[in-house]
Amino acid sequence: MSRISKNVILVVLTLTSSAFLLFQLYYYKHYLSAKNGSGLSKSKGSRIGFDGMQWRAVKKFIMLTSSQNVPVFLIDPLILELINKNFEQVKNTSHASSTSECKVFCVPRDFTTFALQYQLWKNEEGWFWIAENMGFQCLKIESKDPRLDWIDSLSGTEIPLHYICKLASHAIHLVVFHERSGNYLWHGHLRLKGHVDRKFVPFRKLQFGRYPGAFDRPELQQITVDGLDVLIPKDPVHFLEEIPHSRFIECRYKEARAFFQQYLDDNTVEAMTFQKRAKELLQLAAKTLKKLGVRFWLSSGTCLGWFRQCSIIPYSKDVDLGIFIQDYKSDIISAFQDAGLPLKHKFGKVEDSLELSFQGKDDVKLDIFFFYEETDHMWNGGTQAKTGKKFKYLFPKFTLCWTEFVDTKFRVPCETVEYIEANYGKTWKIPVKTWDWKRSPPNVQPNGVWPVSEWDEVIQLY
Amino acid sequence: MFQACRPSDSGAQRGLVQGSRTPTRIGFAITRYWGPGSGSPQPPTRPAGCKAAEGPNTSRTRGQQTLAAALSAARRPLTPRRLRRRKRGGGPAGPGRGRERHGGGGGRGAPGRAVRARVGLERGQGSLRYCCRHGLARTVVTPPYDMDDWKPSPLIKPFGARKKRSWYLTWKYKLTNQRALRRFCQTGAVLFLLVTVIVNIKLILDTRRAISEASEDLEPEQDYDEALGRLEPPRRRGSGPRRVLDVEVYSSRSKVYVAVDGTTVLEDEAQEQGRGIHVIVLNQATGHVMAKRVFDTYSPHEDEAMVLFLNMVAPGRVLICTVKDEGSFHLKDTAKALLRSLGSQAGPALGWRDTWAFVGRKGGPVLGEKHSKSPALSSWGDPVLLKTDVPLSSAEEAECHWADTELNRRRRRFCSKVEGYGSVCSCKDPTPIEFSPDPLPDNKVLNVPVAVIAGNRPNYLYRMLRSLLSAQGVSPQMITVFIDGYYEEPMDVVALFGLRGIQHTPISIKNARVSQHYKASLTATFNLFPEAKFAVVLEEDLDIAVDFFSFLSQSIHLLEEDDSLYCISAWNDQGYEHTAEDPALLYRVETMPGLGWVLRKSLYKEELEPKWPTPEKLWDWDMWMRMPEQRRGRECIIPDVSRSYHFGIVGLNMNGYFHEAYFKKHKFNTVPGVQLRNVDSLKKDAYEVEVHRLLSEAEVLDHSKNPCEDSFLPDTEGHTYVAFIRMEKDDDFTTWTQLAKCLRIWDLDVRGNHRGLWRLFRKKNHFLVVGVPASPYSMKKPPSITPIFLESPPKEEGGPGAAEQT
């Protein structure tokens, strides 16, 4: 009897088990079809060739940002170039992309780079979680705010600089632009902290973040590429041109503070008035040259003031700028005149030792030196009005970087120390109030005399 | 999909058929079915025999992983849990947890079910293997039941069954005498079946839930393979060994201290300070100090504050109380009853100059108490030193189970660190920390940065930020809180609301410290928002009116268009309950009231910043700003009814009496969306026209009456009255000060005047006061009227010091 009942139990159990198995099969099938069904219909609906990992990641990212109202715009140089090439096509046939195959976003690459203006970002923290939830693995790179750097007594919440969000093998690099005084956008240096997984993405291949960068605030436009609506800079060509020269150097606030601890700031009314006037003159000059599209940088004493003390040296009597001679435009003089800065004197000629001086308001002079490039060095010229003697100031070769000075974006030589040491020697850290432009600089060389016949042309005083 | 024991045995149907006959096989089929479709077969070289109850580790792990993958795939859309895991990952236990989730392990809450199911499966798999192997080795060990009992299941195909039967019977007869073996296998089969059923139920439930969740999910594209990452981190295995805190509490006449685990968390031996009951709240799980307060219960009303505070402390927290000097004089019955409810014996009976030390859990047991009675009125009780052990509870007990959202994550972080913020940390129905006030249509101040200047008064800051974030038209990302000093708690409050906080190393002392803090904050604000033309400056001890931004939005263009303006302020110095009436009315005044104001960037950058008082000058920044050198005759716009309310008491320059007298009765607008009247008439020239119009239609009061009498103004409503007082020179305010005194308004210095004219409300009538002859409006005085003159009383004690309010 016991055997029978046992067997009965076994049978019952077997049957139950089978029944459950069937149920399970049923549900699992249901589940699978529900899951695959949606995926299937999706891929059916989309065009052929639109299944690249890159395209999917970008699509997902755009879905994420548009649902969260995060106004990201595309700054990826590779993509922008492609878009730019196809720009006319895209424009002419607004729905051409829906018929043709995926041309732009399916291009094989490791990253797609987007940017965002931080102050337009309303829900940063929430966004992060949603991104992770959608399957992105995100890395956030933060740093302290450089806009607070000048006061060492402030320490605040760190600001986000970069987000890198990975979806399977493709990563989206989101560069966070911050607004800076001088109406430009700044992005930070992508510096990995100790605990970060260095193999998270191939960081070396990133297009942005190797250095901090500065950009003009771009106007944006919406376009549809490969079935995706993206914002891109209205003038992609200009933006692409900016990228290689966007490197930004912060003023060395710490050193400047140390300098002022040693030498004390000049707080007299005269000093402050001069600084204020020089600042206005610099800003006016920057505006004028920018309008002309002429590249220029802070040179000589102004550059030293920026580098050493992050301010205008109060006892310097003028403001100095440098321009490459190949960027010279004949309408510079008239443009400055129109801006209310009459020409004070002009030395040299375009072919040799050109130097312009403009008379600013309130007795502050603006000197513009033109730089000539040789194979292994750069130089600019000087002329003594009385004697017609020529001088040559030699500099090691340099490239140009952006910086912020007197609330304005300026270029400075990236190799600033070399530049300043050439001009002022190793002791540039020590303030010197008496300076003879013909003798004091260590990089000055006599360069002959202008022939008297040319004096009328090469020495013009107003 | 199905995988039978042997590598060759791959047909799903066959698996089913066989399974239906031999229960062991069913189980196996089920189990493997949850494995991967391409799951690797069992190693064929496995030793046969029933004793091989469990497979080798390798195969087990694989089964586990694939199962985990399947399970997690099914549970993919469990978003909040993932979120929580992320957050925890950020904590100290981060990396460890990360690893655990790959290896699989326990879960918590609902996921726990799935995990248990898996464990069950494993077990099933093990026993199944055991019998399956057995069956395979000898084809079938024993018939699990008689053939007579066999009822063909509809599932079974007769062909397979018939074929199997003979094969099966042969073996059955061969093995009949091996009874023990047969029994063993039978029992095993029964056990296995039971397990299978349980496992099946679990799996069905799980699958079902997964389906329903998947269909609810808005994001159907779930095809990324992150399956392993989906598993929950395991529940913490207990809380380790229960830890104990060693707490020392000392109470005496001149010194109190509290040490937790040898670290002094409170020490007060300063003279003439810190009298009363010191209260410390510890986190019951970590032992961290969450709040530190002292209630001077020798003085009136402090016991009420203590009751308020103790009631706000969450249940379960560790409370430490100790008395310095005297703590009983104004300890009233309510407070004593509360101490009794905490379990204290001596607290409710605390007497004059007794010493008392107490450690207890809120709502829980008393952990230690010592008390020493004062022997006589003139002497103190003996110092008492209480040493006690406080057992720590687990972190989970100490935390509330709020829904896992971003807001609650902030809340949890906050509530595990600090105490004394009331219902924000209440487990049930906590007060919201996000306010979504209506946006303002056409908001002109949406992009104006807001700088909140704060010190170390986190409770004030909390109250202030609540009101600020509730104001219509606020944009939280424009707010920056500047904290003077490296205080943690104010930063915690700032983080609770998800705002930006900046700490500032204190420079200099006293008022100069405040000045330097202001300067750094203002400069930083304009650096952080380089595009801003204005900044709103607030302080931590202000309530902000619901229409604060609406008020600014309607008036800010004045600051752009009218150079004769210095600021727009939300505060009317003379706007008391009995002297302010019209929320739509604005004034121009020569004084700078502060307390919620708008600063023009150009004014700051070009004039104020370069000249700002240096650290060695012990000046008040606001007094400095009011100086004629800075103000240069410019005026501020203020509302009749203030848009801010100054609730601060314990400030740098304030004492309780002062606040009571001059700030408490201030009128504060609570009406949303007030439309300001005739804003453009506030511009320089238009305002003169307006004032002249007002004076022309104003009824001249009876100057023979005493202006301090209530009857000086008739009991009318809506009239405009004017009175003329004597004011010899621009800076002669003798009569005005006396008049202000009897009007019970600000009389410590001159506020709210515009070219010798004061405007306020009395008994709902607009009341104008003109100083004659200094004011240019004196010409409106009828020749017959003699200006009122009030003499200042002989100087005796003077008020409570100079006007030091900001």
Image: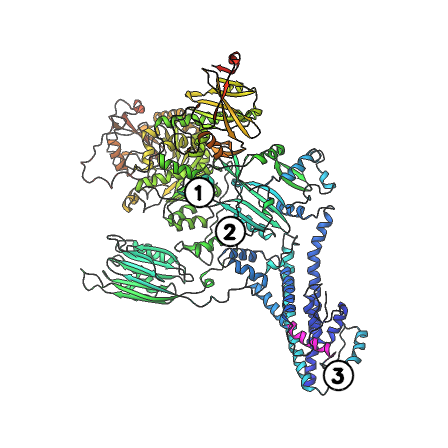
Local SS, label 1: strand
**What residue sits right under mark 2 in the picture?**
A194
Chain on which label 3 sits: B
Task: State how the image is colored.
Answer: rainbow
Residue B678 visible in this rendered orientation of the protein: no
Q: Distance between the residues labelled 2 and 3?
A: 68 Å
In-image side of B54 versus B604 (left or right): right
Mark 2 secondary-structure assignment: loop
Based on the displayed image, in which of its 4 quarters is residue B360 positioned?
Answer: bottom left
Mark 3 Cα-neighbour bin, 10 Å: few <14, some 14–19, many ≥20: some
In this rendering, position of residue B478 left or right of residue A115:
left
Q: Is residue B77 above or below residue A411?
A: below
Percent x, y of residue A36: 70, 56
Residues drawn in magenta: B124-140
Q: Which chain carries label 2?
A: A
As drawn, the label of residue B172 is 3
Per the model, the C-alpha gap separating discs 1 and 2 is: 29 Å
Q: Which amino acid does label 3 sit on?
A: Lys
Report the residue marked by disc 1: B480
Say if B715 sits above or below B690 in the image.
below
Label 2: how many Cα within 10 Å (few below 14, some 14–19, many 20+)? few
> Is B738 within the magenta?
no
Please say if the residues under marks 1 and 2 sit with CB atoms less than 8 Å apart: no
Which residue is nearer to you in this view: B228 or A211? A211
Q: In this view, does A426 lie above or below B141?
A: above
